[in-house]
Amino acid sequence: MKKIIIYLISGVIILSLAFLVLFDFNKAQDSKSTNLEKVTLAEVAHTIFYAPQYVAIEKGYFEEYGIDINLILTSGADKVTAAVLSGDADIGFCGSEATIYVYNGGEKDYLKTFAQLTQKDGTFLVSREKIENFTLDDLKGKTIIGGRAGGMPEMTFEYALRQNGINPKTDVNIDTSVAFAAMSGAFIGGQGDFVTLFEDSVMIITPLFNKFINIFSI
């Protein structure tokens, strides 16, 4: 009988110790979580260019440095800029032209570019019709949805055309009336002969066009 009582007491003690250890562990985890500095990050697009960031968030690398990342999608550099200026975001991923526009606009609390993430533009040129042996000369006389005027993707596209002897003002019609987030939808709806898109949008519209679409990286 005494042995049974001893066993019961020992079991209660062990369970109590286990509970205390678990409680302290959860308390430490909660304390660690509350001590993290929350940073809201607005990205202009979900893109493979930012893959290292997604891995770092998923693996908890930011938390190891005391940072809790709140990642939000804010399509278009103008939208990212507005989010940062309004305080809805602490950091924005977008073309650096946005900082220039804000500064030239006389904004006292202007944005600052502090890091370079990419060296190339991630845009793809997408065709509505299949074109054998495509060259950029096939764009002449065509309408291309190029994105917001003065935006980095649109300016990069114009640069690529000029580098290949095509005048973006006279040889082609670049439609800059479509907002960044609406470009794929406008193209699917029948607007334009070509469109410039990031790979996330390309993956969405490719199944819709099946064999009638060509994708060319610029």
Image (cartoon, helix red, strand yellow):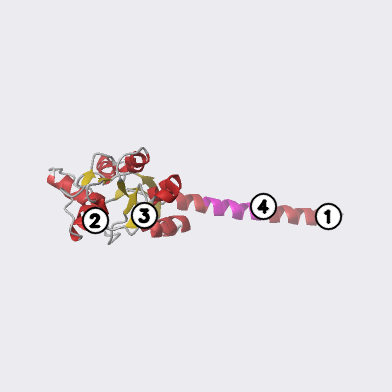
The residue lying at 44 percent from left, 44 percent from top is 208
**Which numbered disc, 3 or 4, marks the residue that appears first in the sequence?**
4
The amino acid on which the numbered mark 3 sits, given as a three-letter code, is Ile
Spot the residue most to the top.
189
The answer for how far apart the CA atoms under marks 3 and 4 are is: 64 Å
The amino acid on which the numbered mark 4 sits, given as a three-letter code, is Ser
**Which numbered disc, 2 or 4, marks the residue that appears first in the sequence?**
4
Q: Which mark is residue 16?
A: 4
How many residues crowd around disc 1 within 10 Å: few (fewer than 14), some, or many (20 or more)?
Answer: few
* Residue linked to disc 1: 4
Find residue 96 and report its horizontal and vertical position in percent.
22, 53
Give the structural element (helix, strand or loop) at label 4.
helix
* Residue linked to disc 3: 215
Is 150 on the left or on the right of 215, as rendered? left
What residue range appears in magenta? 17-27
Nearer to us of marks 2 and 1 is 2
Nearer to us of marks 2 and 4 is 2
The amino acid on which the numbered mark 1 sits, given as a three-letter code, is Ile
The answer for how far apart the CA atoms under marks 3 and 2 are is: 15 Å
